[in-house]
Image (spheres, helix red, strand yellow):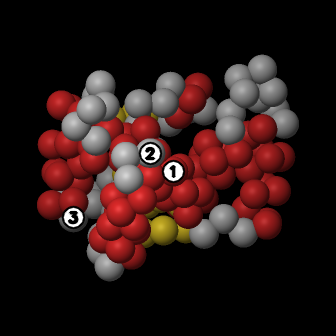
Amino acid sequence: MTPTFLDASGWFAALSPRDQYHGSAAPFYQDLLGGRRRIVTTNLVIAEVHSLLVRTSADTGVRFLDRLYSDPRHEVIWASRDLERAAVDRWLRPFLKVRFSLTDAVSFEVMRLQGVKRAFSYDRHFVAAGFEMVPE
């Protein structure tokens, strides 16, 4: 089955009932979890989601991390120095006018290396980088 990259914007929307995209994100995420497709993300994305959840409460952030790291359905790629450098060279330097974040650039590089074509995201930067955004 087609793997899906899990971006902070999609993940947070699925977890937060106050997010404007929660209505489409929550069922989509549940389908991802219930399916057999690979779910790939990075530790940088996890840090972004945690940062957003902590705004609700510190306990919410810790519970998110506890659930995540005990759930084998989430494949977490850790950003090494070499991965970050490759992301800078392939995604940040050539796209200076688009203003990708380092987290986005590392996400794109992981997707490229892992052969992932679609991202569960509401961040249009994924489309600018040539990837498919779901749900849409």
Q: x, y percentage for residue 44?
A: 59, 57
User: Dot 2: within a 10 Å radius of its alpha carbon, few (fewer than 14), some, or many (20 or more) residues?
Assistant: few
State the residue at coordinates (40%, 67%). 62
Q: x, y percentage for residue 87?
A: 74, 50
- 66 vs 60, nearest the viewer: 60
User: Dot 3: within a 10 Å radius of its alpha carbon, few (fewer than 14), some, or many (20 or more) residues?
Assistant: few
- Does 99 sit left or right of 18 as displayed? right
Residue at the disc numbered 3 = 36
- 56 vs 103, nearest the viewer: 56
Nearest-to-viewer mark from 1 and 3: 1
Q: Quadrant of residue 75?
A: bottom left
Report the disc number at residue 51: 1
Q: x, y percentage for residue 29?
A: 24, 49
Q: How far is the residue under mark 1 from the one under mark 3? A: 28 Å
User: Dot 1: within a 10 Å radius of its alpha carbon, few (fewer than 14), some, or many (20 or more) residues?
Assistant: few
Using the rendered image of the protein, determine whether residue 68 is visible from the camera's viewpoint: no
For label 1, the SS is helix
Q: What residue type is disc 1 on?
A: Ser
Using the rendered image of the protein, determine whether residue 50 is visible from the camera's viewpoint: yes
Residue at the disc numbered 2 = 55
